Image (cartoon, rainbow, N blue to C red):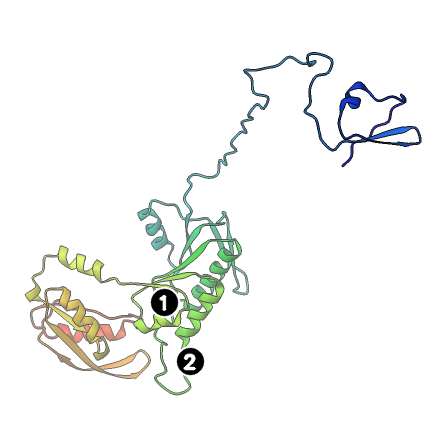
Amino acid sequence: MPLSYSTAAAAPSPLAARSRGLLRSSRSGSVVVRCKKIDQLRAVNGAPPYAPMPNRSLLTPVTLPIIQDANIKNDTRLRIFSGTANPSLSQEIASYLGLELGKINIKRFADGEIYVQLQESVRGCDVFLVQPTCPPANENLMELLIMVDACRRASAKNITAVIPYFGYARADRKSQGRESIAAKLVANMITEAGANRVLICDLHSSQAMGYFDIPVDHVYGQPVILDYLASKTICSNDLVVVSPDVGGVARARAFAKKLSDAPLAIVDKRRHGHNVAEVMNLIGDVRGKVAVMMDDMIDTAGKFSFELFCIHARQVRV
């Protein structure tokens, strides 16, 4: 951009006269000077009007105060929230990890609708929601979905649904015509709500993990039971693992193998409907031994009660 100035004198200044490549043009008494080369700035009339400061920087660094939030107790990005299904379990998990449960407000409206509000920030956090879908299964499942949605809308980085008891897991296949595969439906609902990962304990069947389009961590309670039996110092020859039905033989055999190949017994029964079964026979030697019964799900415990009665009739400690 050309440098323009106006002057009342007709003759140029001595500095301008010594410059090379000056172009002059007169417009209404004004002199316009265009320079092709910019000379280095230097003092013409002697020393500069300010005193030099050789040992002092012209730019002084400015230190900004650090703003600290008094509400932040630690810098962890891990948050654990509990639903209303099993808050005591959630508290034990948080205490084991050395954390506090996140603050959340869950309430029911008069018509039964569920209201969920997170009372602390989860932006950029790894959130774990502990909510088993135990009875009432429908309410607890819906509560879990709304909790996941609230975390997703609050910009959580990762959302893991911790479901110790996964409801509708028994509806994992069509045993009769025109049945619903509700396990797949529930898996889709959890995924669409916004969960990034699911942690489930002892599924009714392992193939149900394939119903999820997100990673699934399937954990087992066997190590805890094994530690408990080891603390009782029971000889493996005095143990017998009992499978409550033929479908659980593989599970019971794997558990018996971890008990130094303890013997196995099988209860043969016939099902006459949902939660209705009749014990036909007990296969295996259980007399005078400590029986450990294993099943993937205990709902009414009706069949367990009758099976225990039959086993007790053979003088077995359970």
What residue is drawn where x is 7% and y is 62%? 235
Q: Position of residue 218 (x, y in %)?
A: 31, 64
What secondary structure is marked by label 1? Answer: loop
Q: Determine if residue 216 is in view.
A: yes
Residue placed most toward the observer, 86 or 192:
192
Q: Amino acid at mark 2?
A: Ser
Q: Position of residue 63 (x, y in %)?
A: 53, 27
Q: Is residue 276 left or right of residue 21?
A: left
Q: Position of residue 179 (x, y in %)?
A: 41, 83
Q: Amino acid at mark 1?
A: Phe
Identify residue for label 1: 166
Q: Is residue 9 left or right of residue 71?
A: right
What residue is drawn where x is 7% and y is 72%? 287
Identify residue for label 2: 180
**Which corner quadrant of the image does residue 98 belong to?**
top left
Q: Is residue 26 left or right of residue 242?
A: right
Farthest residue to the right: give it: 28
**Which corner quadrant of the image does residue 57 belong to?**
top right
What label sits on residue 235 in the rendered view? none
* Quarter placement of the C terminus: bottom left
Q: Determine if residue 107 is in view.
A: no
Q: Position of residue 78 (x, y in %)?
A: 40, 48
Q: Is residue 253 above or below residue 163?
A: below
Q: CA distance from mark 2 to mark 1?
A: 17 Å
Of callouts 2 and 1, which one flags the residue occurring earlier in the amino acid sequence?
Answer: 1
**Which corner quadrant of the image does residue 181 belong to?**
bottom left
